[in-house]
Image (cartoon, rainbow, N blue to C red):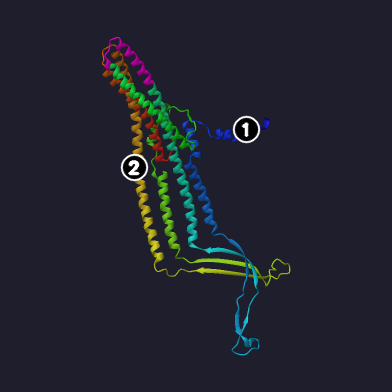
Amino acid sequence: MTNKFYFILILLLPFAGFSQEAPTSFTLQEAIDFALQNNRNSVNAQWDVEAAKAQKWETTATGLPQISAAVDYQNFLKQQVQVIPAEFFGGNPGEFAEVVFGTKQSMNATATLTQKIFDGSYLVGLQSAKVFLDISKNAKTKTDLEVRKGVINAYGNVLLAEESVQILQRNVDILKKNLDEITKIFENGLEEEESVEQLQITLSGVESNLKNVTRMKTLAYQMLNMTLGLEIHRPTVLTDNLERLTQENISLGLLEADTNVENTIDYLIAENDKVSKELMLKLEKSKALPTLNAFINGGYSAFSDDFTFTNKDQTWFGSSLFGVSLNIPIFSSGMRSAATQRAKINLEKAENDLIDKEQTIQFEIASAKSDYQFAIEDYENKKQNLKLAERIEAKNQTKFFEGIASSFDMRQAQTQLYAAQQEFLQAMLDVINAKAELETALNVVME
């Protein structure tokens, strides 16, 4: 029994560890921090940075000394026969003797050291590796900004769904109570049947919306889990409140934030592209330069008719060689010139793209600021509208039960209230999302 208990405990330990590593309760900031470490896009972007670092060293190492070794073993299954004049061996002139040169087996062991002395493409390659690393780092920053925005949107959608469910459920409870009261009044002959039917229509519509929003809430949680990097069906608890988050995300100072386009990540990425095109032009030009390489090698060779190379008395003959190789491009039938021209064209396109990107970013920032300001103003407007709709609905309900207002008037007031409730919830979410959009465009995070 004791052994069985320990066996079950060992099986459960990994799952206990996972539950500690992946918290199920998040504030918005905790959700953002968790996603930046666990979202698959962020993780892959970090791996891209590490790969770029490795590639940078790989490129650097190609210009450092390279040492290689080789062992060659040869065994002539049938040696090649050569013919030479027989008179060399005292034979008759005009006759040939068949001879075999060398031994049947041989083995060579060599080691070679090579070193680049000058290669223009290597120098460009070093610069390109650094730029590629910068590109990967900027891509990681861009990915993290998008992941952050995605978490804020997904988190807000969950809160919106939760609030919607609560409001709709409260509306259903109130409508059921009203329907029960008006039904009793109708049964006593003090109200028309149309009033009961009007409430039934309203209740049916609200119940249908409640079912739909409940399903949407499930999907919203699944989307949030995907954004966080969790399994989509994992239970998750959000500890922030939609209205509190909205208040925290009203930051008028953000509207006055520095709009220096050159600090934005999209501009930096476009600038990376321009620099890479400049390096491609330099690379094509460098191909017209000579290259100089040096090498030195040493080795030993042994020969035998039988495999005796592992014997201590086997004779080995040493050799060594030093050399320098100079390669001078002279004529390529215009191929290098065409490649250089193509690189120039690509560079000009990249320069135009950078100017276009600068203007696009300026417009996006201005548009994001406008959207954010409107979201704040719309939130205040929808907040006031909700208060008005609540008062109107309360007055009409009182008038209806006092026999002053019709069921149609009350239903119209209720419909107006329900619309104002949803518009207010959406307005709160719009503030949060608009701020995240502006922060992403500015490449800043306002606390």
Residue occupying image coordinates x 30% and y 11%: 187
Question: At which x and y percent is residue 338?
Answer: 38, 63
Q: Quick check: 222 above or below 170?
A: below
For label 2, the residue is 363
Looking at the image, the residue that sits furthest to the right is 313
User: What amino acid does circle 1 point to?
Assistant: Ile
On screen, residue 436 versus residue 48, left or right, reads left
Q: Nearer the viewer, residue 285 or 171?
A: 171
Identify the image quadrant of the N terminus: top right
Range of residues picked out in magenta: 170-194
Query: Does 189 lie within the magenta span?
Result: yes
Circle 2 packing at 10 Å, graded few (<14), some (14-19), many (20+), is: few
User: What amino acid does circle 2 point to?
Assistant: Phe
Is residue 228 visible to the viewer in this orientation of the structure?
yes
Residue occupying image coordinates x 34% and y 48%: 356
Residue occupying image coordinates x 46% and y 49%: 135
For label 1, the residue is 8
